[in-house]
Amino acid sequence: MRFKLQLEVNKRAFGNRLPINYQYEQSAAIYRILARADKDYATWLHENGYRMESGKTFKFFSFSRFDVERYKILREEGRMLILSDTVEWQISFLPEKSTQSFIQGVFMDQVFEIGDRKSVVQFIVRNVEVMPPPEFAEEMTFRTLSPMCLKLRQGGRKVDYLSPTDVSAPYILFKGLIEKYSLFFETECPFYAEDCCLEVLNQPKSVLVKIKADTSQETCVRGFMCRIRISAPLELMKLMYEAGAGSLSSMGFGFLEVEK
């Protein structure tokens, strides 16, 4: 289920300078808000998610970047100056507990901060709207509202972040989607990566995202903003729309919007 949050920018609190890299802080804010209403649920989501026999876990939520109508980029400072009084934020939850009343009750009127050691912006949730699902088909066109991350581990700890145009990208994308299906529905997925097709419709834009910026745990993840056409069974199409495309969806990667 997908929600659109209307956020008031409380510039009086800490100002309006938002770090350009703020995806990790968005994810942390979601955990904190859930914890205020249901600490056990937030702890489970953070520590366990859905666990496969291999030990790999999935957390079935995803979210977009902030949709800011008016802003200014301060590149030398690595900041975004928010000029609008409000911003929009889309969040999608797949776990069974994430019903409409639960999420609306949890998020409505919440106050949270996004930022780092240099600057922070405070937001107030003024409205939580349920977004109607699109009309799903076995072929659909999407654009990314947050970078899509396609990870390929090359032995040991080395990880390559693939462009959607890479020859291995379709297999990585759909293999991960099939794993999510099996885990969420607790049954073997009846579909195969060969049943699906990925077509990239424009030149992907590479985006390097810092996780835990300016700390000793800082890491960088590369994702890509692009338009894509997907052919896949309806069940996988719905799952990808709700839970995100590619890796690290719960860190704000691979959030898709349907193009008509």
Image (tube, helix red, strand yellow):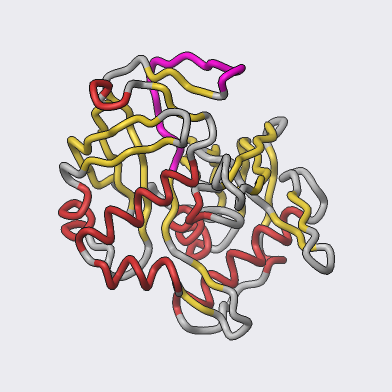
Q: Which quadrant is the N terminus positioned in? A: bottom left
Disc tally is 0
Is residue 238 found left or right of 171 in the rendered image? Answer: left
| Residue 58 drawn at (x, y percent) | 51, 68
- Which residue is drawn at the image coordinates 48% and 38% (left, top)? 22
Is residue 195 found left or right of 67 in the rendered image? Answer: right
Residue 81 sits in quarter: top left
- Which residue is drawn at the image coordinates 22% and 38% (left, top)? 125
In the depicted structure, whether residue 111 falls above or below residue 38:
above
Q: Nearer the viewer, residue 31 or 174?
A: 31
| Residue 42 drawn at (x, y percent) | 33, 66
In the depicted structure, whether residue 66 falls above or below residue 85:
below
Is residue 202 found left or right of 9 in the rendered image? Answer: right
Residue 179 painted magenta: no
Q: Nearer the viewer, residue 234 or 19?
A: 19
Is residue 97 found left or right of 51 in the rendered image? Answer: left
| Residue 114 drawn at (x, y percent) | 38, 37
- Which residue is drawn at the image coordinates 27% and 39% (left, top)? 5
Q: Nearer the viewer, residue 197 or 57?
A: 57
Bounds of the magenta segment: 64-77
| Residue 134 drawn at (x, y percent) | 38, 47
- Which residue is drawn at the image coordinates 53% and 77% (left, top)? 182
Residue 189 sits in quarter: bottom right
